[in-house]
Amino acid sequence: MGRTVLPYSQILEREYQDWKKFRRGLRREDQAVLDRLFDLARLHVQAGVYASRPWPLETILVSILIEQDKALAGLRAKLLALEEMIGKKSNADPGL
């Protein structure tokens, strides 16, 4: 009989387990960061199922990059809003 293909969620979990030795070598705060990165990848399990790539780590890393880019875009928007707010205040009040 043919080989059974593991569900992507199990592949993702297996990949996380494979990184456990690396994780143990990290400082505690960096261990938390690695855990969060894999949590970000878990947000895109459905896309990983559709991708069906031969190297699952590619899909995991792209999923993480998507979430990181969304966070960066959100920070950029907040920074722009703050800069605009500061610019309006400084134009309205020359004493600043």
Image: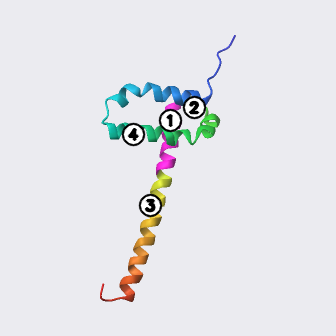
Residue 42 in the image: state x and y as whole percent.
55, 38
Does the magenta segment cover residue 58? Answer: yes
Q: Earlier in the sequence, mark 3 or mark 1?
A: 1
Residue at 61% x, 36% y is 51
Q: Which of the marked residues, 3 or 4, is nearer the chain's N terminus?
A: 4
Identify the residue under disc 2. Answer: 53
Asked if the residues shown at circle 3 and circle 1 are in contact, with their CB atoms under 8 angstroms apart, the answer is: no
The boundaries of the magenta stretch are 56-68
Mark 4 against mark 2, which lies toward the viewer? Answer: 4
Residue located farthest toward the front when viewing the structure as drawn: 28
Q: Is mark 4 on a helix, strand or loop?
A: helix
Name the disc covering residue 75, or none: 3
Q: How far apart are marks 3 and 4 (CA)?
A: 21 Å
Residue type at mark 2: give it. Answer: Arg
Q: SS of the residue at dot 3? A: helix
Indicate the quadrant where residue 83 lies. bottom left
The residue beneath circle 1 is 58
Looking at marks 4 and 2 on the same chain, the residue that comes earlier in the sequence is marked by 4
User: Which secondary structure, mark 2?
Assistant: loop
Inspect the image, locate mark 4, and give the three-letter code of the amino acid beneath it: Ala
Q: As drawn, is 61 to the left or to the right of 23?
A: right
Q: Distance between the residues labelled 3 and 2?
A: 31 Å
Which quadrant of the figure has residue 36? top left
Quadrant of the frame with the N terminus: top right
Residue with the mark numbered 4: 32
Figure disc tally: 4
Where is residue 53 shown, x and y percent of the image? 57, 31
Q: Which amino acid does label 1 sit on?
A: Glu
Question: Given contact means CB atoms under 8 Å apart, are the residues at marks 1 and 2 in contact?
Answer: yes
Residue 40 point in image, percent of width and height: 50, 43
